[in-house]
Structures are given as structure tokens and as C-alpha cells.
Amino acid sequence: MNEIVIQQKERTTDKSKYRVLFLSVLFDFIGTLSFAVPLLGEFSDVIWAPISALLLKTLYKGKTGTIGGIVSFVEEALPGLDFIPTFTLTWVYTYVIKKNN
């Protein structure tokens, strides 16, 4: 009986892990949309930078979320760095690299 409960918890964890991955890819896509609008792009980054930092800090808790939020803010605020998938890289760090350590 205990094994069944543990397996169900693992499935829930996997499901939430992939939900966070989906949101990360979505937020990275939103961050790269500024390339689609030539003159409005850099202005939209000024608006998106604090929003993305807050979203990343909320999505990834603790020190990872705090550092990731700062990196996300800088990446979005500086021109030309919008192509870096900060949310997805944070997911890889959290669920692949950090998990193996």
C-alpha cells in the first residue's frame, strides 16, 4: 500500500516538473517576442524585465529563484541578450543538474 502512494507522489512531482518546464518555455518565448516588433522591441523589454524577474523568482523558490530573477532582469534589460532562455536554463539547473548533485 505504501509503494502505491509513493508512486503516485512521484507522478505528481513529474507532472508539476513538466508544468514548470512548459511555463518556462512559454515565458522564454514571450521574452523573445520583442525581436518581432522592430522599434517597439527594446521599449517592451523595459516593461518585460521586472515582470520576468518576478515570474522567475515565483516559479523557482529559494536561492535559485532569487539569483535567476536577477539574471533574468539583467538579461531582459540589456539590449541584444533576449535570445538567452533564462527560464529554461533555470529549469535545467533545478531539475537536471542540481538533482544529480
Image (spheres, rainbow, N blue to C red):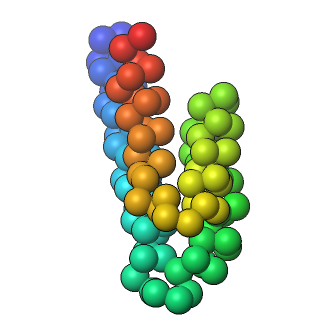
57 relative to 94 in the view: left or right: right
Q: How many marks?
A: 0
- x and y percent of residue 53 in the render? 65, 53
The quadrant in which the N terminus is found is top left
Q: Is residue 16 visible?
A: no
12 relative to 81 in the view: left or right: left
- x and y percent of residue 20 in the render? 44, 46
Of 12 and 63, nearer the camera is 63
Q: Quadrant of residue 55 in the image?
A: bottom right
As drawn, 74 above or below 62: below
Q: Quadrant of residue 98 in the image?
A: top left
- x and y percent of residue 41 in the render? 53, 80
As drawn, 96 above or below 30: above
Q: Residue, x 40% and y 46% (percent of image)?
A: 88
Q: Is residue 74 visible?
A: yes
Of 16 and 22, nearer the camera is 22
Q: Residue, x 38% and y 34% (percent of image)?
A: 92
Q: Residue, x 48% and y 48% (percent of image)?
A: 86
Of 40 and 8, nearer the camera is 40
As drawn, 59 above or below 78: above
As drawn, 97 above or below 75: above
The quadrant in which the C terminus is found is top left
Q: Residue, x 35% and y 26% (percent of image)?
A: 96
48 relative to 94 in the view: left or right: right
Q: Quadrant of residue 66 in the image?
A: top right
